[in-house]
Every structure is written in C-alpha cells, then in structure tokens.
Amino acid sequence: MPELQVIARYTLAPGNEEEVLALLPQVVEASRAEPGNVSYAVYRGLDDDREVILLERYASRDAFEAHRESPHFKALVLERIVPLLASRVVETYDVVD
C-alpha cells in the first residue's frame, strides 16, 4: 500500500490568527508521534498570512484514518481549530515513487 500525502489548506478567520497559530505546534508534536506518521509540517502564506498549509505524510491510508480518529485530532483540530477558520480544504494523494 502506498504512502499517503495530505495537503490541508486553512484560511484563518480574521482575528483568530494568533489563537490558531498557538495551537498548531501542539497538533504537529502529537501527530509526529503517531506510529503511522512519516512527516508533518506547517507553512504560512507569504502573500496572505491568513493562509496556512499543512503538509502531512502517512505510511498508509489506514494510518491517516487512525490520525483522524486520534484524541488530539478531535480535541485540537476539530473542536478548537476548525471553528476559528474561514475555510478548510483537505486533499489526499497516493504517493507515487
């Protein structure tokens, strides 16, 4: 089974930038500790600092599903970060070697 590349595109709602940016390092740390996580990095847009990209790679689709079911994903991302966003788009791709 191929690795899975995830690209999560966040647009932060005005006024929520600092709160979201303070939560993201906790998400990164917890996600990198998952057994199926290969990499996890956050980038902020140069032209629009309300745009944030999360590049995530998982060992498999099952590993990504485990990530989405993890307590830290539910508590930090779904319950605390998502309500502070203007938009969120998540793209998934099989990695081609």
Image (cartoon, rainbow, N blue to C red):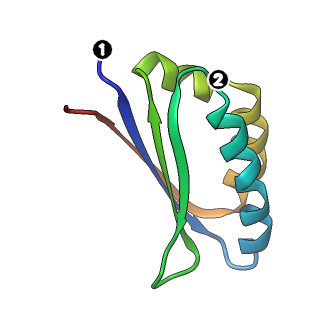
- Cα separation between marks 1 and 2: 20 Å
Place residue 11 in its image quadrant: bottom right
Residue located beneath label 1 in the image: 1
Going 75% across and 34% down the picture, which residue do you hit? 72
Query: Along the line of sight, which residue is nearer the eye, 4 or 65?
Result: 4
Up the image or down, 49 lies above or below 44; here it is below
Q: Quick one: SS at disc 1?
A: loop
Q: Residues within 10 Å of mark 2 (few under 14, many from 20)?
A: few
Circle 1/circle 2 CB separation < 8 Å: no
Which sits in the foreground, 87 or 3? 3
First-in-chain label (1 vs 2): 1
Kindly identify the amino acid type of the residue bearing the numbered disc 1. Met
Residue 51: horizontal and vertical position, in percent? Answer: 52, 71
Q: Please tell me whether mark 1 or mark 2 is closer to you in this view.
A: 1
Tag 2 secondary structure: loop
Q: Position of residue 30 (x, y in %)?
A: 72, 36
Residue placed most toward the observer, 45 or 69: 45
For this orientation, the residue located farthest to the bottom is 47
Taking the spot 48% from the left edge, 42% from the top edge, the residue there is: 56
Outermost residue toward the left? Answer: 97
- The quadrant of the rendering that contains the N terminus is top left
What residue is rendered at 67% in x and 52% in y? 82
User: Position of 28 compared to 54: left or right?
Assistant: right
33 vs 50: above or below: above
Quadrant location of residue 17? bottom right
Mark 2: amino acid: Glu
Location of the C terminus by quadrant is top left
Q: Is residue 14 above or below residue 82?
A: below
Residue holding disc 2? 69
Report the disc number at residue 17.
Answer: none
Classify mark 1: residues with Cα within 10 Å, few (<14), some (14-19) or many (20+).
few
